[in-house]
Amino acid sequence: MSTSTDPSVVDRTKTLDCLWSFQNANGYISDGFLKQCAADLDISQIELEGIVSFYHFFHRQMTGEFVIYLNNSIVSECKGFLRVKKAFERETGNIFGKPDRCGQFALFETACIGLSDQEPAALINFHPFTNLNTLKVKRIISELKKGTPVESICDEVPDHIRFKPKGDKCILLKEYNLGLAIWKLQNMGRDGVIEVLKKSQLKGMGGAYFPTGMKWEFCKKQPATPKYIVCNADEGEPGTFKDRVLMNKLPGLMFEGMISSGYAVGAEEGIVYLRAEYIWLLGKLEDTIADFHKRGLLGKDVAGIKGFDFDIRIQLGAGAYVCGEETALLNSMEGKRGEPRAKVFFPTEKGFLNQPTVVNNVETFCAAARIIELGADHYLKTGTPQSPGTKLLSISGDCPKPGVYEVEWGTKVRDVLEMCGAEDAYYIQVSGPSGECISAKEFDRKIAMDDLKCGGSFMIFNSNRDILKILENFTAFFKHESCGICTPCRAGNFIIQRKLEKVSNGLAYSSDYEEIKQWGNIMGMTSRCGLGKMATRALLMALDKFPEFFATKVDQDGEGLNKKFDMVKALKPYEQFGD
Amino acid sequence: MSKKITIKIDGKALKVEAGRNLVTVAEENGIFIPSLCYYEHIDPPLGTCRVCTCNINGKARPACTAKTEEGMDIELDTKTLLDVRSAIVEMMFSEGNHFCPACEKSGDCDLQHMAYEMGISYTRFPHLFKDRMIDFSPKRMVIEHNRCVKCHRCVEEIHTDDGAKVFSFCNRGNETIVSIDIEQEAKLSEEQAVNAMHICPTGAILVRGKSIARPFGDRQFDMESVKKPENAKAVKKAKSKKAPKRDKKVIATTSLAGCFGCHMSMLDVDLGLLDLIEVVDFHKSPITDIKKFTKKCDIGLIEGGCCNTENIEVLRAFRKNCKILVSVGECAIWGGVPAMRNTIPLAECLEEAYLDSMTTEPEENVVPYHEDLPKILDKVYPCHEIVKIDHHIPGCPPSPNHIWKAVSSLLWGDEFSVLYSEFKYD
Ligand SMILES: Cc1cc2nc3c(=O)[nH]c(=O)nc-3n(C[C@H](O)[C@H](O)[C@H](O)COP(=O)(O)O)c2cc1C
Ligand code: SF4
Ligand code: SF4
Ligand code: SF4
Ligand code: FES
C-alpha cells in the first residue's frame, strides 16, 4: 500500500483496473502511460513494470485490433489445437507470440480458458469462440477482416449441464429462487450461520478442502475491522469450468453465499476476483449485483437486517493461474504482483490489506447458500457420512458428453464414466494437472473426501493418447505459470521439462525416472505454495501407475558406460558452415 | 526479555526465548541452519530461496519463516533434509550462470559459501544455460542477471529516501528477473548503492569502481567453516580404514575443453610429485605424451568438458580404458568457463570469432570446416552427460592437495578429509 496521504494519489488497489482501462483503449501499456500511472500510484516505474509483466494479458508492445488467445491446454491439444493454430496463422498471416506489424491481428497462446467442454476454444478480444476447426477459423477471420464486430459473431457458450441427482438429492443445481438463503439469515443469527455450516461438514471446493464453517468462525473471531469476503473466481485449474457455469446460471446463488458469509463474520465488503478469461460473464454479474441492490439484498441494512451493510464489487484478474492461490489472489487485489505470500498468517488473520478475510471458491459460496436455504440435515442426507453433499464435476476430454455433472460425493468413477459415455478411458486426470491421475485399475474408486478427492476438473483420455504428451503439456503449463518467487518451483519445473524432453527424444534411461521422482519430491517438499508442491504430482503418479507405458520409452541402465547422445542434433548448428 | 521456552533441534533440547527467528536462535546456539534469502532486518522474512528447509513438528518448512514456540520439534540434519537443502543450492547453480572464477563476489558470496558448507562437488541437475543479460544501463550500478538467485532482498530493502523501490521483480516464473529503476537508482547516495551491493548475497549487484574483489585468503568465506568443528563433517570420507598398501597404479589424464589449468594444479604438488612417481605410472597423458591407450588404467583424470567431436571420442576412450573416471575441475564437471558460450547460439559465436571479428583479414573470413578438423558441438557438455563419471573434484582449478588426496584415496583407500580451505570453485 502506498503510504502517501496525498489525495491525488490513486488507491493502490485500483492498479489492475487502471492498467486494463488504458490497455482496452490503446491495445497495450505504453511507456508514457506506465510513467504516468506509476506517478499517480506514487510508486516507482520499475515496480509498476514488475506488476504489468507479471500478468500475461498485459502487453508492453502494440498488439492489434483483434487480440486472439488460443487455449493450449491438453484438452485443446487433443481436440486439434495444432491445426487450429496453423489455421489462425495462415488466415491472418501472423505468427503466434510475434507482434503484428500491421496492428490488425495479434496471436497468443494461453492456458486453459475454462471452455474445456468445447475445445479447441479461443478468446478474440475476450469474446469466446468455441469448437474451432480450420473452416471455422477461416470464416471468423474473413468476417473480422470485413469489419463485422466481434461480439456479433462470437459463440454463445452453452452451460452443458448434463446430470443432476434426482429429487432432494440435487443441491447446487436445483431450482433457484432468489433470496431464500438471505431472508433466513436474521433468524439464524451470526453464530447460527456458522453452526449450520459446521454441522453440514462443508469443505472448500477450490481444491484445498478446508472446512468452510471453521474458516468463517476464525474470521468472525478476529477483532480487527474492516473484514472482507473474497470470492475466488479465478478458476484456473486446466479442465475446470464449473465455476463458469455457476456464474452464468446461478450468479445470485454465489452472491447469496458471499452475503451470508459477510453477515456471519461481520464484513461490509465482498469482492469477486474474476479471471480475465471470463470477462464475457462480467455484464451478467454486474446486472445481478444491480438487481440485488434494487431488491435491498445489497447495500444498507441488507434484507432488512439493521446495521448489516454489505456491498459486492468485481475485481478483474489479468492472466495468471497462480492468482487462484488465495494469498497470491490477495496480493493481486492489492495491485501487486500475484506472488503467493510466505505463509506467516492465514488470510482470516491478515488477508486483503492485512485485514481479516474469508477467501472461498465460487462453488463453496453456492453450496453455503444452499445449506443455509435447505438446512444442514437436508445436505447431510446426500453423499456419504464421511463425505456429505454433492460436487460439480467439469468433465472434458475423450467422452461424447463433456460438461458439468452434479454428483453426490461417493459416486464411483465407473459410474461417472458411464454417465458421460466415455468408452475407452485409459488415463484420467482428476482435479487438473495438480491433482491425481488414475488408471483403469482404479475405476471402482469413489469420488469422496476419504478416497478420490476432486476439485472439479475431470479430464478423460483414451488409449490412443500419449501419456508423455499429456505430462509434457502439464509441465509446460506449470513452468509458464510459476510465479518465480521460490527456487524449487521456478527452476524445478524448467529442469523437469528438460528431463521429459530427454525421455521423449529417446535419450533417457530408467535411472532418469528415478531422478524425476527424487526431484519431483524435492519440489513438493520445498515449494512455497501449492503450485510448486503439486506440479510434479501427476508425473510421479503416472510413473507409478503406468509402468508399462514408461518402460517402452527408456533403456535399462548399464548398457555400456557411454551414455546416449544425440550427435546429429549437437552438430546441426555447425554443419551449416560446411558446404 | 521474553519468556524462556524449550525447543528441540535434532533431539537436543535448547532453552531459548519465545517468538524469535529460528535461524538466528539456532545460530546463537552454535547450530548452523543454511540460509540464503534470510536477512535479519527484513520482517516478515522473505522465505524465497527454501535453502533453510527443515522439518518443524513433522512438516517440511523453511526455518527462516518460523518463530520459536514452546515444544517446537525440529529435525535438521536428517539424510533426506541434508540432501534436499543441497538440491536447492544445486538448482541455483544450474539455473543461473555462475562462473565463479570470473566473479567479483567470489569468496564473499553467500551462495558459494552455502555450497562449500554443504560440500557440493557437482550439481545433479542439468545446467540450463539460459541467455541472460548484464544490465549496464544504470550509471553507477551493473546488474549481472546471470548471478541473481531471486532472493528478493534488494526488492524489499533498497528504497530511495522518498520510499520508492529501486528494484523489482519483472516477468514471471523462470523468466523472472530483478530489474532496476534507473531514475530511482540515480537518487541513491553512494552509501546506499554500496549497501545494495552488500545486501545482495551473490555477485548480481555491482557498483562501478567499488570492487569487492579481494585476494585469496582475505575473503569472507575462504578459510573457516561456520560450522563448529565437531559438526563440520569432512567433505569426503575415505572408504577403508586399512593401512595403505602402495601397490603401483596406472594413471591417465587428458585435457578436453579446458585450459590446462587443472593439469598445472596437478603438477603443483611440487616435491610431492617425486613421491608420487614412485607409486604411479602415467600412461596416456599430456605429461607423458602417450597418445593411445595400450593398457587398462586404474584411474582417468579428465580436465575440461566436451566442446567438439574429438573430445567425445577421447572421453569415451577414457571410459573404456579406465576403471575409475574422475572429472577434475569445473569445466569437466559442468562446462566451466568455455561454457560461457552455451547461452549463445553457436552460429553467432563462430560468426563473431571468424567473420565479423576486428582482426579478420579481408577475404579470410571463413569459418573453418574441414574433414580433418573436429566438429564443434552446439554447446559445451559436461563429461557426465557423455559417459558415466565416478567422482567430481571441484575447483577452477582444484587445489593440488584436494586432487591428490582424492586420487590417493580412490587408488589406495587412504583416509582423507579435504579441509574447508581447500574446497573451492575458483
Ligand atoms: C496454484 C493454485 C491455484 C489455485 N487456483 C484456485 C482457483 O482457481 N480457484 C479456487 O477457488 N481456488 C484455487 N486455489 C485454492 C485457493 O488457494 C484456496 O484454497 C481456495 O480459494 C479456498 O476456497 P475454498 O476453501 O472455498 O476452496 C488454488 C490454489 C493454488 C495453490
Ligand atoms: S511454488 Fe511456484 S508459484 Fe508457488 S510461490 Fe513458489 S514459485 Fe511461486
Ligand atoms: S561467486 Fe557467487 S555469484 Fe559469483 S559466480 Fe560464484 S556463485 Fe555466482
Ligand atoms: S540481485 Fe541480489 S539481492 Fe537482488 S534478488 Fe538477485 S540475488 Fe537477491
Ligand atoms: S533462508 Fe529460508 S527460505 Fe531462504
Image: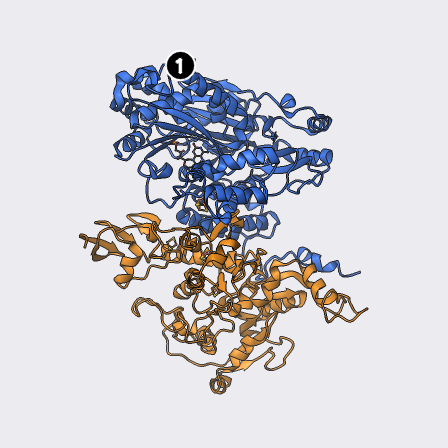
- Which quadrant of the figure contains the N terminus of chain B? bottom left
Residue B32 appears in view: yes
**The chain shown in blue is which?**
A
Residue A383 visible to the viewer: no
Q: What's the colour of chain B in the image?
A: orange
- Decide: few, some or many residues near mark 1? Use Cα within 10 Å; few <14, some 14-19, many ≥20: some
Image coords of residue A476 (percent x, y)? 55, 43
> How far across and how far down the image is residue B68, in percent?
25, 51
Camera-side residue: A166 or A346? A346
Q: Name the amino acid, label 1.
A: Arg
Residue receiving disc 1? A295
**Where B272 sits versus B255, above or below?**
below
Residue furthest out toward the front: A7
Left or right placement of residue B13 versus residue A545 in this view: left
Q: Position of residue A427 (x, y in %)?
A: 52, 34
Where does the image place residue A101, in percent across and percent down from the top left? 70, 41
- Say if A14 sits above or below B250 in the image: above
Query: Which residue lies at the image location 43% right of the left edge and 44% below the top edge?
Result: A533
